[in-house]
Image (cartoon, helix red, strand yellow):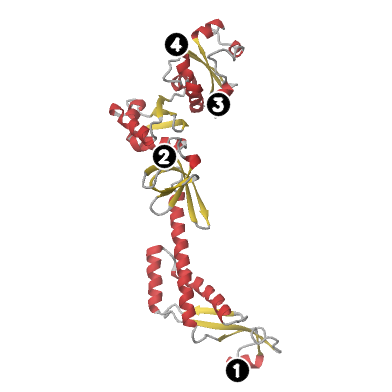
Amino acid sequence: MNAEFLAALEQLEREKGIDKDTLLEAIEAALISGYKRNFNSASNVRVEIRRDTGEVKVYARKTVTEDPKDTRQEISLDAALDLNPNYQLGDIVEIEVTPRDFGRIAAQTAKQVVTQRIREAERSIVYSKFVDRAEDIVTGVVQRADNRAAYVDLGQTEALLPVTEQMPNDRLKPGDRVKAYITRVERTTKGPQVVLSRTHPGLLKRLFELEVPEIFDGVIEIKSVAREAGQRSKIAVYSRNPDVDPIGACVGARGLRVQAVVNELNGEKVDIVKWSEDPEEFVANALSPAKVVRVHILDEERVARAVVPDHQLSLAIGKEGQNARLAAKLTGWKIDIKSETQAAELGMFGRLTDEFDEEEDDIGTLSADWLNEP
């Protein structure tokens, strides 16, 4: 090694952010192992790389004793005094033992150490970059796909998109560009592992942030998201500016904004509802597109009881209970739904009482527990 090698280390320090002294210390530690392995030495040695010239020196470290038993580890007091009259018993004497052809071993070892440290530094940089982007949206290109996962190139690293995190109607092929949500970033022996999802509710939220400037600017806030990936979703939005319509802003002119989100999600239907701090109003909004006549809240049971027109009962419940189930997830309330006729038969108008629970098996009634099943 020479001054050119030191200059190369300084360049690495500038470009990769790897401290030159840290690299030199790692090379010195590796050279100790290389010396012992190649020269069959059990000596206690120290390797020094001169910081000004890059010259490599190997020193055997021996303890000064009166009667040396192992000359590789110990030196007599007389021999030590010949080297330096100031040595005393118990001192450590360093004797240069640099082999003639050690430069070749040093150069090879240095290359291996530097390569390894560069790889570790690059992995650390990638990890630092993506760990800060957890719960964010990224765009990548599918490199390959199998029955377990799709592997997405994000530029600096390859991310994993498991089959369980792909939408039912996703048909990913090499070369496809996809947007996905970063669920977690892990350190592994092979470098950082970025795990993606296209089913996470966070993806829907981030897509609206990309398409709706008012959300990005903080004028409109997405309060909650409920999603059944590939089928239907609901988002609750709120405007901090009374002059800005949160639903209209999310839909966009001629529906272009929401349509861009729907297209990215392969046609997944998205209901945008207005959030309200009044739970009765919020539950009624969440059951959209059904029109709700009345909602009664039971705070202790965390149950919302909704009455809808007879002809909209099936609309409020939705196919296989999907609309009501999503509304329950969106609001955080268990929701029971009855038609006006059923409510009248139970004497619910004017007094919503526990009689609501008596006929849970009635056609059109959706039990609270079933509503919240995944």
Front-most of residues 157 and 297: 157
* 237 displayed left or right of 357: left
Label at residue 311: 4
Mark 2 and mark 4 lie on one chain; the one further toward the N terminus is: 2
Label 3 to label 2: alpha-carbon separation:
29 Å
Mark 3 and mark 2 lie on one chain; the one further toward the N terminus is: 2
- According to the picture, the residue beneath numbered tag 3 turns out to be 372
Which residue is at 33% across, 31% downward? 259
- Quarter of the image with the N terminus is bottom left
Image coords of residue 158 (percent x, y)? 43, 52
How would you rate the neighbour count of disc 4 (Cα within 10 Å): few for under 14, some for 14-19, many for 20 or more? Answer: few
How would you rate the neighbour count of disc 1 (Cα within 10 Å): few for under 14, some for 14-19, many for 20 or more? Answer: few
Comparing labels 1 and 2, the label whose residue is closer to the camera: 2
- According to the picture, the residue beneath numbered tag 1 turns out to be 82
Labels 3 & 2 near each other (Cβ < 8 A)? no
Mark 3 and mark 4 lie on one chain; the one further toward the N terminus is: 4
- According to the picture, the residue beneath numbered tag 2 turns out to be 171
* 18 displayed left or right of 86: left
Which amino acid, mark 4? Answer: His
Label 2 to label 4: alpha-carbon separation:
38 Å
